[in-house]
Structure formats: C-alpha cells, structure tokens
Image: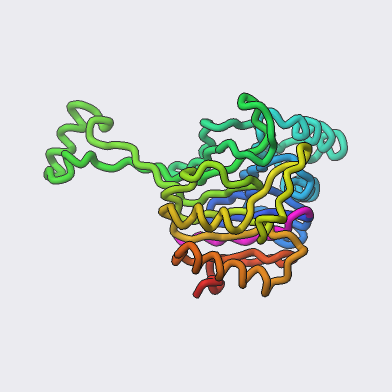
C-alpha cells in the first residue's frame, strides 16, 4: 500500500502525524484540526506517545469537532496520570465530547484497526522512570496476514481444501506479521534493533550536534540526528522520515546535516524530513533529502 503521511513536528511547539489510509493519528499537537480541517474526520484512532504539551494540546479542538458515540479512541501510556485528568476535564467542559473513549495501553498490547492492521505499543526511554512504570511509548503499525504453510504451498488447491475440511484451517496457514510503519515518539536511541524490518520509520531527531544534549536529571530525553542515522545504517528499513527538529536550526543546516550523516554511515534508503514550522502534506511524495 502507498501510505499518505502528513504532519507537523517542531520540538517544544507541536507534533502530529496523520496516516490517512489507516485513519490513525500519532500524537495530537497544536494546530492539528486547523490544518487538516475536514480530513480530521477520517481519524478514528489517536495514539499519544506521552504527556508533554506539544504532543497533546490539539486534542481539545479535535475532540470537539469529531467526537461521537464510541469515537475517536485515544490511546495513552498506562501510567500517565495526565490523560484521565484530561478526559474528565473535557467531558465536564463539553459534554458533547463524552462519546470519545480513552484507553491506557502498555507494551505487549495489540490494538486492532481493521481485519489486517494492528498497532502495538513499544516502551521507549523519553521519560526516565522505573522499569514497571509506563509513561512514554513508541508505536508500530503492523500488518497481520494468514499465509499457507510452506510445506503445503505446492499442494493442489483441492488437497488444501480437503485438509481444511478434515483438520481445520489452522492446520494449513501460519500468521505472518510485517511492521509497516514505526513511530518513535520522543526518545533517545537505546535499543538498536527496535525498528529492524520496518517499512517506514518516523523518528525524532531533535538535535543535530552531539554536544547539544546535556544530561539534566529532571528533563526528558531526545534523539540526536547522528545516533538515529547510525542506528538506521545497521537495520532493514524501507524509508525514513525525520522530524521534531529544534527550531534553533535553519532548513539548510538540517539538510546539510542529514546529507553528511547519510554519507558518513552509508545510508542509501530515501530520507525525508519535516522541517521546523512547516506542515508537510503527503511526506513520501516529496523529494528525499538524499536524492
């Protein structure tokens, strides 16, 4: 499938990505509905990575315009107390939004989008908490299909139908999963294999220079472009979308840094970017930085 991914992502100010064909939104920063207008009505599932304001302040207007019985559904990190409080406030502030559902999720959960698509939450390292506490998540959009078992692939269709009738369909097929889209949310790179075999990876790259990241005990953690590109160079990934750049950087500075990192780490897959302060419609139809 050709995915239509549109979004806005500027560190500190707002982040959201709309996956049109799946009716999915990753994060819901400010300006979401003012940008998408009627397209926002296509969104049924909203996956929030964490409770920083630049990732959720678009919820109020989005919900006011689109809430109905049972929809949309907001998914959020299980132990983030901000979301139950936000849900209660919104329902008291505007009772017409009461139809929306709010569901806490954890790594290992599977959220079904349709017959063939699920979303799985993945723990990340943006918020430093104890291992059993979940306050920040990445997400994977996964395709789930049933395929004929390899040992049966050469049999005539009549023989396969016979096996199904006698033993059940489960004896003829196996489940195959493919990660179509990965969304990092805000997180430093820690698990180098997390995004292996991902079709499209949307990853934050807040800082261009390694010395821009200062360790402050009470601050949440972000990625550097260098570490993201180094990770990608070791994995099987189809396309890369970079965003969440700090607004301190000019577009030309970001593009030069991306090109330099591609050359340094031998990254040849298409690399796209969402520049600070810019809405990008249909990201993947644009020209990759490294082409």
Front residue of 154 and 179: 179
Q: Is residue 180 above or below residue 38?
A: above
Query: Which residue does the image show at 52% across and 38% down from the upper left?
Result: 120
Query: Going by the image, does 279 lie left or right of 4?
Result: right
Front residue of 265 and 89: 265
- In this rendering, the count of numbered labels is 0
Q: Is residue 149 above or below residue 202?
A: above
> Which region is colored magenta?
1-12
Residue 60 at least partly seen: yes
Q: Is residue 14 above or below residue 103?
A: below
In the picture, residue 215 is in which quadrant?
A: top right
Query: Going by the image, does 277 lie left or right of 43?
Result: right
Query: Which residue does the image show at 74% across and 40% down from the upper left?
Result: 51
Residue 17 drawn at (x, y percent): 64, 55
Front residue of 68 and 204: 204
Q: Is residue 133 above or below residue 226?
A: above
Residue 146 drawn at (x, y percent): 32, 40
Residue 90 drawn at (x, y percent): 82, 38
Query: Which residue does the image show at 59% across and 42% down from the upper left?
Result: 138
In the picture, residue 7 is in which quadrant?
A: bottom right
């Amino acid at each position: 499938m050709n995915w239509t991914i549109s979004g806005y992502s500027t560190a500190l100010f707002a982040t959201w990505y709309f996956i049109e064909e799946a009716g999915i939104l990753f994060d819901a920063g400010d300006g979401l509905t003012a940008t998408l207008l009627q397209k926002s009505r296509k969104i049924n599932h909203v996956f929030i990575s964490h409770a920083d304001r630049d990732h959720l302040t678009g919820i109020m207007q989005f919900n006011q315009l689109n809430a109905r019985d049972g929809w949309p559904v907001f998914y959020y990190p299980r132990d983030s107390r901000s979301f139950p409080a936000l849900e209660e406030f919104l329902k008291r502030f505007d009772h017409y939004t009461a139809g929306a559902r709010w569901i806490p999720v954890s790594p290992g959960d599977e959220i079904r989008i349709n017959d063939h698509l699920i979303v799985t939450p993945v723990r990340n390292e943006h918020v430093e908490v104890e291992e059993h506490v979940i306050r920040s998540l990445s997400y994977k959009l996964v395709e789930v299909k049933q395929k004929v078992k390899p040992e049966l692939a050469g049999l005539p269709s009549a023989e396969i139908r016979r096996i199904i009738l006698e033993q059940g369909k489960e004896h003829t097929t196996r489940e195959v999963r493919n990660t179509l889209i990965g969304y990092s949310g805000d997180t430093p790179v820690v698990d180098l294999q997390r995004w292996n075999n991902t079709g499209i990876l949307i990853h934050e790259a807040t800082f261009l220079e390694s010395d821009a990241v200062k360790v402050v005990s009470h601050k949440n953690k972000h990625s550097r472009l260098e570490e993201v590109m180094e990770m990608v160079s070791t994995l099987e990934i189809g396309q890369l979308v970079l965003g969440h750049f700090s607004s301190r950087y000019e577009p030309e500075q970001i593009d030069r840094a991306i090109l330099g990192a591609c050359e340094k780490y031998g990254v040849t897959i298409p690399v796209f970017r969402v520049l600070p302060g810019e809405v990008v419609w249909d990201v993947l139809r644009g020209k990759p930085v490294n082409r």
